[in-house]
Amino acid sequence: MDYITKPAVMTAENQRKMIFSLKKSFPFLGVRVIGKSLCQRGIFSLHIGRSENPLLIAAGFHGQEWLTSLLALHFAELILKSKACGMTVSGADTACISREIIIVPCVNPDGVQIAINGIDGAWKYAENVRKISASSDEKWNANARGVDINHNFDAGWAELRNMEIDEGILGPSPRRYGGYMPESEPETLALVNLTKARRPRAAIALHSQGEEIFWEYGKNRPPESERLARIFAAASGYTLVENDGLASHGGYKDWFIEYFNKPAFTVEIGKGENPLPLSDFESIVKKTVPMLTLAAIL
C-alpha cells in the first residue's frame, strides 16, 4: 500500500509536506499550530477522533532523534487509513478507538533542522549555534538557544540543574543543558500549554535509542502505570527501565506524571547510534505500532 509518510529525512519542509498531505487525504484530521519555535517554525498538533479523554503522543524532542517524528506521522497515517477504510492496525479494529488521539510530531523543529543541516538550520541563531558547537564535540540535540527541551520541563528542574553543573554543563550546550529556568523555551511551553488545555488520560514521549520504556518518576507511580507499562513492553519487546543520572528529572514524562498523577511513558525506539538510519524504520514500526495502537485503545 502507498504511504504518504514514506521513509525520509525529517527536515522541516518534509514534515510540513507530510502533515498537509495527510490533511488533504483525510479531511477529518484536525491540524493545529500550538506554538512556534525560536526560529518561528510552526509546532504542529494532529487530532484524530472525538475530542474526549485523549491520548497524547509527542516526538522530535531532540535534534538527532528525528526518526521519532517520522514514526509519529506514520502512526497517524495508519490510524487515519484505518478509520477511513475500515482496516485494522496491528490486528486491532480502530473503530473501537472512541477517544481522541493527539500527536505532536516534532516538539523541537529547530533542533531537528540544525541536526540535519548544520548551523544554517538555525537562521538568526546561527552564530549562537556556531559558538556553542565550537566548544563541544557533541552532536546537536538542543533547540536553537542551546537548551535541551527534555531537560526544560518543571519537574525536579533545580535538582537536575545542580546535576548538570556537577557534570560540567554550565550553560548552553548541544545537549543536556536545561535552560536558565524551567519552561524558559517556547517549544516547552507549547507542549505544556497544549497538555494543560487537553488534560490527556496518558502521554507517550518518543525518543531514541535503546528499545526501552521509562514509566515512573521517582517514587511516583500513577494508577495503571505499571499495568500499562507491562502491556506496552509485551507488545513491543522493549525493556522496562528506571530513570537515573541526568535522565532523572526535567523531562516531559516526568512533568506529566508529577502534574497530573496520570500514566506517562518515555519510549526509546530502536537501537544503535543517533541519528538512527532510515533503514531501521521498518523494523521500528513493527515493534512500536502495536504498542501505540494499544495505548490508543486502552
Image (cartoon, rainbow, N blue to C red):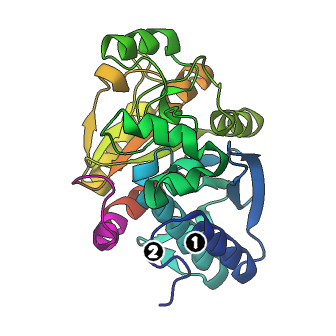
Quadrant in the picture for residue 41 = bottom right
Verify CB contact (< 8 Å) between mark 2 and mark 1. Answer: yes
The residue identified by callout 1 is: 14
Q: Is residue 201 above or below residue 96?
A: above
Residue 8's place in the image compared with 2, above or below, is: above
Which residue occupies the extreme bottom position in the image?
1
One can see residue 143 in this view: no
**Dot 1 surroundings within 10 Å: few (below 14), some, or many (20 or more)?**
few
Q: Amino acid at mark 2?
A: Ala
At a point 60% along the width and 81% down the height, the residue shown is 86
Q: Is residue 276 magenta?
A: yes
Q: Is residue 87 left or right of residue 209?
A: right
State the image coordinates of residue 185 (x, y, percent, origin top left): 65, 31
User: Which residue is at a point 50% across and 44% down the rendered structure image?
Assistant: 61
Q: Indicate the quadrant where residue 225 lies.
A: top left
Instruction: Give, as a single range, the part of the protein colored magenta.
Output: 272-285
* Crowd rating for badge 2 (residues with CA inside 10 Å; few <14, some 14–19, many 20+): few
Task: Return the residue at label 2.
Answer: 8
Q: Residue at x 61, y 60 (%)?
A: 97
Q: Report whether 237 appears left or right of 39.
A: left
Identify which residue, 5 or 94, lies in the foreground.
5
**Compared with residue 291, is residue 62 higher up or lower down, i.e. above or below?**
above
Q: Is residue 127 magenta?
A: no
